[in-house]
Image: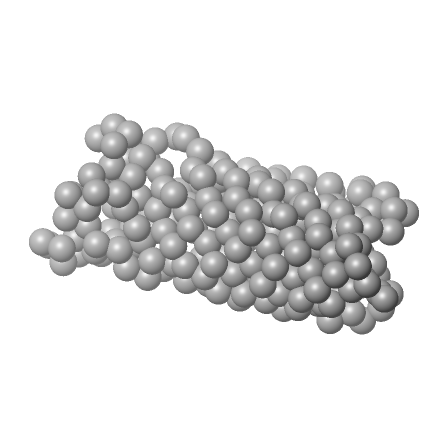
Amino acid sequence: MTKKILLIIILLLITTLSTLFAQGGFEASINIPVGVAIGTGNDAFKELNYKGSIGLDSGLEVQLGYMHKVYNRIGAGFFIDLAYNYDSFVFKHTINNTDSSMYIHNFGIGFLPKFMIYNISIGIGGGIKIPIYGKKDLEYGYSSSVMHYFKATLDYSIFVSEKLAIVLGVYIAHDYGYPLKSIGDTPRFGGSGGGFIFGFKFGPQLKD
């Protein structure tokens, strides 16, 4: 299932590149985020004696959109954010002092408005994540539902040709969490964290 979703994302990008390049302000980017997250839970989850710990997050993102030139090298744009995410929700049981965690493969879809000045871009957005597969050490499973997320990015584009740039940046994100399956929808676990972004961007450079 994960391989099929990645293939769909890549094919979507390839089939739209010709259209994107034909219209000067359109952009497409492929990014790999790598970071850490601390497990978070609502009050009902904390009452089960779990405390958040640190886990590793990664994935593959595809962003498609249009960057409108406002003035000289200043622009603003609106982007669709498609992603495969590997998210770790790590916890410790405060009484038994045992590690409990949930490792979930998600498919994410959201929106990421961006503001750009020269080659520096700031994005703030969000969307939903749909669980594809999960491995649990946590004694409770998660219900089959969507999870909302928030994300903010800061990156710098290094253009190596007229329409190709290497993207280096950082991000912060928060996953609002899944409800626990065997208890109902009240206790929820999520995660907050951040990390680094490496990728490539296809699109025109803003010029004076």
Q: Quadrant of the C terminus?
A: bottom right
* Residue at image point 24% right, 37% down: 187
Residue 135 in sight here: no
* Residue at image point 56% right, 51% down: 124
Tell me if 51 is positioned left or right of 23 in this view. Answer: left
Residue 142 x, y percent position in the rendering = 32, 36
**Tag count:** 0
Q: Nearer the viewer, residue 116 or 95?
A: 116
Residue 44 x, y percent position in the rendering = 20, 39
Residue 195 x, y percent position in the rendering = 48, 64
Tell me if 204 is positioned left or right of 175 in this view. Answer: right
* Residue at image point 45% right, 39% down: 148
Tell me if 208 is positioned left or right of 123 in this view. Answer: right
Residue 117 in sight here: yes
**What colour-coding does the image apply?**
one colour
Q: What is the residue that sits farthest to the right in this orientation? A: 22
Tell me if 155 is positioned left or right of 200 in this view. Answer: left
* Residue at image point 61% right, 51% down: 61
Q: What is the residue that sits farthest to the front in this orientation? A: 71
Q: Quadrant of the N terminus?
A: top right
Q: Quadrant of residue 158?
A: bottom right
Q: What is the residue that sits farthest to the left in this orientation? A: 95
